[in-house]
């Protein structure tokens, strides 16, 4: 093969690689930003949605999302699903994520809080940022010596 | 209070920070008596964790004394001496009820940054808040969420220097041999002679392994492993590890290979991914006998290229992972410590006041002065 031919092959291979990369990245973008977000929660559907009522973290979303619950296979509890009403949001994918308006991410957070509330009785709270907290107040002296 | 804070790549300092406070009904506050360094902190120290923020408090292995309990805490009272497991787990979700506490659904507080591998696992002390983590135990006080699940009373006969290793290092080793199903007569090879590697070797011996071989490049660590666990040392700088392991296992290869070498220790410019990463894992896969089990105890969040997938499929290997260990093994390990069947205090090669914790981490990171673990007293 001539040097020109090898160069052309190399360019073609490079172009194919770039196209493949672009294709992969495109394929990785969720084509349905309004898809169902689902978690599996301990308990039966009638415990998760008693009398059809939504658990506390979901209630503020009444009118903005639709919800269903069904038994999970193998005794794993209840599959609880949420998705936005009204189809695709104005911004989708990475753009929505950048501006903090990713409904999927937000709904996953709400579902996680719902599951924590149902399974542990409360929503686990993060440590507060040092900027939000008061100065030290406990005595810093060592405690009574034990066996250590 | 004083706490060891991350201040940027390779920069740690003990600073005054606000006291922790009860945030949930199942929380308690512990006054820390001892805390230990861990290899799992080194990627953060090296700047490999982009979610880390200046001022975050490190440390996930600690023992201390209860000073405050939330209204829903049932198993602990003020003044109890407790060891706290590194993983934060609720004890109520499906995973916890299956005994998979390290996979807890409810152990993190947020999904601000969803992990690249999918669903978040159990929470952890001393991990970035943006990853759902909680302030660490290299401090005078620490908040302990789900206290009834993750904290355990320390028997009177077990001192702090021994008990601190029941938080994570000893459970990690125990978990590794349990994952692998180590049985009497097995040949077990362990990569890494740090605290987790040595405690993996000790656990394998306790489960009746016929031979336990520890692979490392630090002669002092290998000597320590041999002395305290009965394992056979193998210095990979001076021997062909694969040939040596074949010879010591009747040509079969070890039944179980455990990668306890930990994540890369160096700064971000050092290879964390690519062909130079995962050397121990590749060696473990190549060494393991047909149908054997490879356990990876601490891969961190790194990617490893050139993984020998063909060896896994051709030899029919089982590969198990466990970056974090649930606290369920801690009571049994404390009981073994109380009977002197599990001795760990020799691993604390450097005992320092908390104010010198940055120095302790430098020694630990660089494996300097024979450092296996630095243990701090606030």
Image (cartoon, coloured by chain):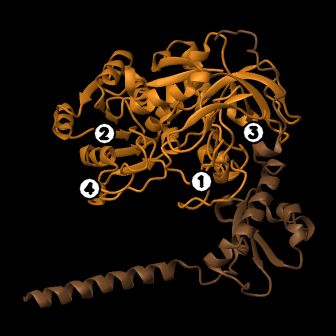
Chain colours: A brown, B orange
Q: Name the residue under label 2.
A: B255
Q: Earlier in the sequence, mark 4 or mark 2?
A: 2
Alpha carbon of mark 1 to alpha carbon of mark 2: how far? 38 Å
Residue beneath label 3, please?
Answer: B145
Q: Give the residue at x 69% y 69%.
A: A105
Q: Quadrant of the C terminus of chain B?
A: top right
Q: Alpha-carbon distance for marks 4 and 1?
A: 35 Å
Q: Are marks 4 and 1 on the same chain?
A: yes
Tell me: A62 left or right of B172: right
Question: Mark 3 or 4, which is nearer the eye?
Answer: 3
Camera-side residue: B9 or B40? B9
Give me the chain letter of mark 3: B
**Residue located beneath label 1 in the image:** B51
Q: How far apart, in angstroms, are the residues tagged by discs 4 and 2?
A: 15 Å
Q: State which tag comes first along the sequence, 2 or 3.
A: 3
Q: Nearer the viewer, mark 1 or mark 2?
A: 1
Image quarter of residue B335? top right
Helix, strand or loop under label 3: loop
Give residue B63's position: percent from left, percent from top: 65, 23
Q: Where is residue B52 in the image (x, y as percent from the top left)?
A: 60, 49
Helix, strand or loop at label 4? It is helix
Give how far across and how far down residue B270 sits, in percent.
37, 48
Q: Is residue B265 above or below residue A97?
A: above
Letter of the chain that mark 1 sits on in the rendering: B
Q: Are marks 3 and 4 on the same chain?
A: yes
Q: In which quarter of the image is the N terminus of chain B?
A: top right
Any part of residue A84 in sight: yes
Q: Of helix, strand and loop, which one carries label 2?
A: loop
Q: Do the residues labelled 4 and 1 touch (CB within 8 Å)?
A: no
Q: How many other residues sit within 10 Å of disc 2, few (<14), some (14-19) or many (≥20)?
A: many
């Amino acid at each position: 093969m001539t040097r020109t031919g090898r160069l052309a092959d190399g360019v073609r291979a490079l172009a194919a690689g770039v196209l493949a990369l672009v294709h992969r990245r495109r394929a990785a973008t969720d084509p349905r930003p309004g898809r169902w977000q689902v978690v599996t929660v301990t308990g039966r559907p009638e415990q998760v949605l008693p009398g059809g009522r939504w658990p506390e973290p979901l209630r503020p979303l009444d009118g903005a999302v639709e919800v269903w619950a069904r038994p999970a296979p193998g005794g794993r509890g209840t599959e609880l699903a949420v998705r936005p009403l009204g189809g695709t949001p104005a911004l989708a994918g990475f753009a929505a994520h950048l501006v903090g308006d990713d409904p999927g991410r937000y709904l996953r957070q709400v579902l996680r809080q719902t599951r924590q509330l149902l399974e542990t009785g409360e929503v686990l709270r993060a440590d507060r940022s040092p900027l939000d907290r008061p100065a030290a107040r406990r005595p810093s002296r060592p405690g009574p010596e034990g066996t250590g | 209070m004083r706490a060891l804070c991350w201040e940027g790549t390779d920069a740690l300092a003990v600073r005054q920070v606000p006291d922790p406070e009860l945030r949930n009904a199942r929380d308690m506050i512990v006054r820390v008596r001892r805390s230990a360094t861990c290899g799992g902190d080194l990627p953060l120290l090296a700047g490999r964790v982009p979610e880390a923020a200046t001022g975050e408090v490190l440390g996930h292995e600690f023992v201390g004394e209860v000073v405050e309990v939330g209204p829903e805490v049932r198993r602990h009272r003020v003044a109890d001496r407790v060891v706290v497991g590194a993983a934060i787990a609720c004890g109520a979700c499906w995973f916890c009820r299956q005994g998979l506490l390290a996979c807890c659904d409810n152990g993190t507080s947020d999904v601000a940054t969803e992990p690249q591998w999918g669903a978040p696992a159990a929470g952890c002390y001393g991990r970035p808040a943006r990853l759902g983590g909680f302030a660490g135990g290299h401090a005078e006080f620490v908040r302990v969420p789900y206290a009834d699940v993750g904290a355990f009373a320390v028997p009177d006969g077990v001192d702090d220097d021994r008990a601190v290793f029941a938080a994570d290092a000893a459970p990690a080793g125990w978990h590794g041999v349990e994952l692998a199903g180590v049985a009497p007569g097995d040949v077990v090879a362990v990569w890494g002679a740090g605290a987790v590697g040595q405690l993996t070797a000790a656990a394998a011996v306790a489960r009746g392994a016929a031979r336990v071989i520890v692979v490392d490049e630090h002669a002092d660590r290998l000597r320590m492993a041999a002395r305290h666990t009965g394992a056979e040392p193998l210095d990979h700088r001076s021997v062909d590890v694969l040939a040596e392991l074949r010879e010591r296992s009747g040509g079969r290869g070890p039944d179980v290979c455990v990668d306890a070498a930990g994540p890369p220790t160096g700064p971000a410019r050092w290879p964390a991914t690519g062909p130079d990463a995962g050397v121990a894992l590749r060696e473990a896969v190549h060494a393991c006998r047909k149908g054997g089990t490879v356990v990876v105890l601490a891969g961190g969040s790194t990617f490893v290229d050139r993984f020998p997938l063909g060896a896994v499929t051709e030899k029919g290997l089982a590969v198990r992972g466990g970056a974090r260990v649930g606290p369920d093994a801690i009571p049994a390990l404390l009981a073994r410590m109380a009977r002197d069947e599990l001795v760990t205090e020799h691993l604390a090669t450097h005992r320092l006041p908390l104010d010198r914790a940055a120095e302790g981490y430098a020694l630990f990171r660089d494996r300097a002065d024979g450092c296996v673990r630095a243990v701090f007293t606030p």
